[in-house]
Image (cartoon, helix red, strand yellow):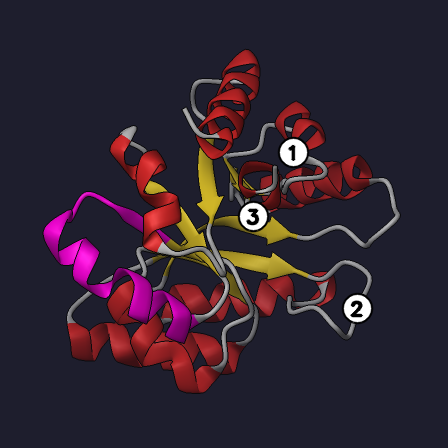
Amino acid sequence: MSFILNNFLKIKSDILKFSSKTNLIVVCKNQSIDVIRPIIDEGHLHFGENKVQEAKKKWQLLIQQKNDLKLHMIGRLQVNKAKDAVALFDYIHSLDSIRLANALSLHEMRLKKQCKYFIQINFENETQKGGVLEKDLHDLYSSSQALNLNVIGLMCIPPKDQDAKYYFEKLENLGKKFDLTLHSIGMSGDYIKALECNSSFVRIGSAIFSN
Protein backbone atom coordinates (compact mmCIF):
# COMPACT_ATOMS: atom_id res chain seq x y z
CA MET A 1 0.00 0.00 0.00
CA SER A 2 1.48 3.36 -1.03
CA PHE A 3 2.09 6.19 1.43
CA ILE A 4 -0.52 8.18 -0.51
CA LEU A 5 -3.20 5.61 0.18
CA ASN A 6 -2.07 5.36 3.82
CA ASN A 7 -2.37 9.14 4.21
CA PHE A 8 -5.78 9.12 2.52
CA LEU A 9 -7.12 6.37 4.78
CA LYS A 10 -5.80 8.09 7.91
CA ILE A 11 -7.57 11.32 7.01
CA LYS A 12 -10.77 9.43 6.24
CA SER A 13 -10.49 7.86 9.69
CA ASP A 14 -9.97 11.29 11.29
CA ILE A 15 -13.08 12.59 9.57
CA LEU A 16 -15.23 9.66 10.69
CA LYS A 17 -14.33 10.39 14.31
CA PHE A 18 -16.30 13.63 13.95
CA SER A 19 -19.00 12.92 11.39
CA SER A 20 -20.12 10.47 8.75
CA LYS A 21 -21.58 13.38 6.77
CA THR A 22 -18.37 15.33 6.09
CA ASN A 23 -17.04 14.87 2.57
CA LEU A 24 -13.33 14.67 1.82
CA ILE A 25 -12.27 16.46 -1.36
CA VAL A 26 -8.92 15.08 -2.49
CA VAL A 27 -7.15 18.11 -3.96
CA CYS A 28 -4.98 16.87 -6.81
CA LYS A 29 -3.45 19.93 -8.44
CA ASN A 30 -0.13 19.02 -10.08
CA GLN A 31 -0.84 15.29 -9.56
CA SER A 32 -1.22 12.91 -12.50
CA ILE A 33 -4.08 10.47 -12.83
CA ASP A 34 -1.59 7.63 -12.31
CA VAL A 35 -0.74 9.07 -8.88
CA ILE A 36 -4.40 9.56 -7.99
CA ARG A 37 -5.52 6.18 -9.35
CA PRO A 38 -5.15 4.20 -6.06
CA ILE A 39 -7.60 6.59 -4.39
CA ILE A 40 -10.05 6.29 -7.29
CA ASP A 41 -9.73 2.50 -7.12
CA GLU A 42 -10.51 2.70 -3.40
CA GLY A 43 -13.93 4.01 -4.43
CA HIS A 44 -13.45 7.67 -3.56
CA LEU A 45 -15.56 10.06 -5.64
CA HIS A 46 -14.77 13.68 -4.66
CA PHE A 47 -11.72 15.34 -6.24
CA GLY A 48 -10.70 19.01 -6.36
CA GLU A 49 -8.69 21.13 -8.76
CA ASN A 50 -7.43 24.72 -8.63
CA LYS A 51 -7.17 25.43 -12.36
CA VAL A 52 -9.71 24.81 -15.08
CA GLN A 53 -7.27 24.00 -17.86
CA GLU A 54 -5.30 21.47 -15.80
CA ALA A 55 -8.54 19.81 -14.71
CA LYS A 56 -9.84 19.66 -18.27
CA LYS A 57 -6.73 17.86 -19.56
CA LYS A 58 -6.65 15.49 -16.60
CA TRP A 59 -10.27 14.53 -16.05
CA GLN A 60 -12.29 15.04 -19.22
CA LEU A 61 -11.85 11.51 -20.57
CA LEU A 62 -11.99 9.81 -17.18
CA ILE A 63 -15.32 11.33 -16.14
CA GLN A 64 -16.84 10.06 -19.39
CA GLN A 65 -15.73 6.56 -18.38
CA LYS A 66 -16.63 6.90 -14.71
CA ASN A 67 -19.54 9.30 -14.45
CA ASP A 68 -20.05 8.98 -10.70
CA LEU A 69 -16.90 11.01 -10.01
CA LYS A 70 -17.58 14.46 -8.56
CA LEU A 71 -15.21 17.27 -9.53
CA HIS A 72 -14.83 20.38 -7.40
CA MET A 73 -13.40 23.69 -8.60
CA ILE A 74 -11.74 25.09 -5.47
CA GLY A 75 -9.43 27.73 -6.96
CA ARG A 76 -10.16 31.29 -7.95
CA LEU A 77 -12.34 31.25 -11.08
CA GLN A 78 -11.94 33.83 -13.83
CA VAL A 79 -15.02 34.90 -15.75
CA ASN A 80 -13.50 33.82 -19.07
CA LYS A 81 -13.17 30.26 -17.70
CA ALA A 82 -16.81 30.05 -16.60
CA LYS A 83 -18.00 28.05 -19.62
CA ASP A 84 -15.36 25.33 -19.21
CA ALA A 85 -15.93 25.29 -15.44
CA VAL A 86 -19.67 24.68 -15.80
CA ALA A 87 -19.05 21.98 -18.41
CA LEU A 88 -16.53 20.09 -16.29
CA PHE A 89 -17.24 20.61 -12.59
CA ASP A 90 -20.08 19.45 -10.37
CA TYR A 91 -19.25 21.88 -7.54
CA ILE A 92 -17.69 25.34 -7.65
CA HIS A 93 -16.42 26.59 -4.30
CA SER A 94 -15.22 30.04 -5.38
CA LEU A 95 -18.25 32.08 -6.43
CA ASP A 96 -17.25 35.60 -5.40
CA SER A 97 -18.83 38.25 -7.64
CA ILE A 98 -22.08 39.16 -9.38
CA ARG A 99 -20.16 39.34 -12.68
CA LEU A 100 -19.03 35.73 -12.25
CA ALA A 101 -22.54 34.69 -11.20
CA ASN A 102 -23.96 36.18 -14.41
CA ALA A 103 -21.41 34.30 -16.53
CA LEU A 104 -22.04 31.00 -14.75
CA SER A 105 -25.80 31.37 -15.12
CA LEU A 106 -25.48 32.11 -18.85
CA HIS A 107 -23.38 29.00 -19.45
CA GLU A 108 -25.62 26.83 -17.30
CA MET A 109 -28.53 27.77 -19.56
CA ARG A 110 -26.53 27.19 -22.74
CA LEU A 111 -25.13 23.86 -21.56
CA LYS A 112 -28.37 22.76 -19.86
CA LYS A 113 -26.45 21.86 -16.72
CA GLN A 114 -26.67 23.03 -13.11
CA CYS A 115 -23.71 23.08 -10.73
CA LYS A 116 -23.64 23.42 -6.96
CA TYR A 117 -21.99 26.55 -5.59
CA PHE A 118 -20.29 27.80 -2.47
CA ILE A 119 -19.88 31.54 -2.07
CA GLN A 120 -16.33 32.28 -0.95
CA ILE A 121 -15.96 34.84 1.84
CA ASN A 122 -12.83 36.96 2.18
CA PHE A 123 -13.14 38.02 5.81
CA GLU A 124 -10.01 40.19 5.98
CA ASN A 125 -10.07 41.62 2.43
CA GLU A 126 -6.82 39.84 1.52
CA THR A 127 -5.94 41.01 -1.97
CA GLN A 128 -4.12 37.78 -2.91
CA LYS A 129 -7.27 35.75 -2.29
CA GLY A 130 -10.63 35.56 -3.96
CA GLY A 131 -13.86 35.93 -2.06
CA VAL A 132 -16.59 38.44 -1.47
CA LEU A 133 -16.45 40.75 1.54
CA GLU A 134 -18.84 39.87 4.33
CA LYS A 135 -20.75 43.14 3.86
CA ASP A 136 -21.40 42.27 0.20
CA LEU A 137 -22.63 38.72 0.78
CA HIS A 138 -26.30 39.65 0.85
CA ASP A 139 -26.18 41.29 -2.60
CA LEU A 140 -24.23 38.41 -4.16
CA TYR A 141 -26.48 35.76 -2.64
CA SER A 142 -29.64 37.59 -3.72
CA SER A 143 -28.31 38.02 -7.25
CA SER A 144 -27.32 34.34 -7.40
CA GLN A 145 -30.80 33.30 -6.32
CA ALA A 146 -32.35 35.56 -8.97
CA LEU A 147 -30.11 33.86 -11.56
CA ASN A 148 -31.26 30.42 -10.32
CA LEU A 149 -27.76 29.39 -9.28
CA ASN A 150 -27.86 26.52 -6.79
CA VAL A 151 -25.91 28.07 -3.92
CA ILE A 152 -25.61 25.43 -1.21
CA GLY A 153 -23.16 27.00 1.25
CA LEU A 154 -20.19 29.19 2.11
CA MET A 155 -16.44 28.72 1.80
CA CYS A 156 -13.44 30.49 3.31
CA ILE A 157 -9.66 30.23 3.59
CA PRO A 158 -8.47 31.68 6.91
CA PRO A 159 -5.63 34.21 6.90
CA LYS A 160 -2.21 32.64 7.30
CA ASP A 161 -0.82 32.43 10.85
CA GLN A 162 -4.21 33.31 12.37
CA ASP A 163 -6.52 31.14 14.43
CA ALA A 164 -8.39 29.17 11.77
CA LYS A 165 -11.12 28.13 14.18
CA TYR A 166 -12.12 31.76 14.74
CA TYR A 167 -12.86 32.14 11.02
CA PHE A 168 -14.55 28.75 10.73
CA GLU A 169 -16.91 29.66 13.57
CA LYS A 170 -17.51 33.05 11.98
CA LEU A 171 -18.42 31.35 8.69
CA GLU A 172 -20.72 28.93 10.47
CA ASN A 173 -22.58 31.81 12.15
CA LEU A 174 -22.77 33.73 8.89
CA GLY A 175 -24.23 30.71 7.17
CA LYS A 176 -27.00 30.49 9.75
CA LYS A 177 -28.08 34.06 8.92
CA PHE A 178 -28.62 33.08 5.29
CA ASP A 179 -29.86 29.55 5.97
CA LEU A 180 -26.76 28.17 4.23
CA THR A 181 -25.83 25.26 6.45
CA LEU A 182 -23.11 23.64 4.30
CA HIS A 183 -19.53 24.82 4.82
CA SER A 184 -16.47 24.24 2.67
CA ILE A 185 -13.76 24.72 5.30
CA GLY A 186 -10.55 23.00 6.27
CA MET A 187 -7.36 22.16 4.41
CA SER A 188 -4.28 20.06 5.17
CA GLY A 189 -3.05 22.22 8.04
CA ASP A 190 -6.34 22.94 9.79
CA TYR A 191 -8.88 20.27 8.86
CA ILE A 192 -9.25 19.00 12.44
CA LYS A 193 -10.34 22.49 13.54
CA ALA A 194 -12.74 22.56 10.61
CA LEU A 195 -14.22 19.23 11.63
CA GLU A 196 -14.78 20.66 15.11
CA CYS A 197 -16.82 23.39 13.39
CA ASN A 198 -19.08 21.01 11.46
CA SER A 199 -17.35 21.21 8.09
CA SER A 200 -19.35 19.74 5.22
CA PHE A 201 -16.39 19.52 2.82
CA VAL A 202 -12.70 19.50 3.72
CA ARG A 203 -10.26 20.19 0.88
CA ILE A 204 -7.03 18.24 1.42
CA GLY A 205 -4.06 17.83 -0.90
CA SER A 206 -0.58 18.07 0.58
CA ALA A 207 -1.41 15.96 3.66
CA ILE A 208 -2.33 13.15 1.26
CA PHE A 209 0.35 13.47 -1.40
CA SER A 210 3.39 14.45 0.72
CA ASN A 211 5.56 11.65 2.10
Foreground label between 1 and 2? 1
Q: Secondary structure at mark 2?
A: loop
Residue at the spot of label 1: 191
Viewer can see residue 45: no
Viewer can see residue 4: yes
Side of 200 where 175 appears, left or right: right
Give the distance between the C-alpha atoms of the residues marked 1 and 2, in whole angstroms: 21 Å
Residue at the spot of label 3: 178
CB under 8 Å between callouts 1 and 3? no
Q: Position of residue 70 (x, y in %)?
A: 30, 47
Side of 74 where 72 appears, left or right: left
Residue name at image x 47 percent, y 69 percent: 51
Residue at the spot of label 2: 126
Q: Secondary structure at mark 3?
A: loop
Side of 45 where 180 appears, left or right: right
Residue name at image x 29 percent, y 81 percent: 106
**Residue occupying the far bottom of the picture:** 80
Q: Amino acid type of disc 3?
A: Phe
Give the distance between the C-alpha atoms of the residues marked 3 and 2, in whole angstroms: 23 Å
Side of 124 where 139 appears, left or right: left
The answer to which of marks 1 and 3 sits earlier in the sequence is: 3
Q: Which residues are magenta?
A: 52-71
Give the distance between the C-alpha atoms of the residues marked 1 and 3, in whole angstroms: 24 Å
Above or below — where is 198 with respect to 109? Answer: above
**Residue occupying the far left of the picture:** 65
Q: Nearer the viewer, residue 184 or 171?
A: 184
Q: Nearer the viewer, residue 27 or 82?
A: 27
Above or below — where is 31 with respect to 102? Answer: above
The answer to which of marks 3 and 2 sits earlier in the sequence is: 2
Q: Amino acid type of disc 2?
A: Glu
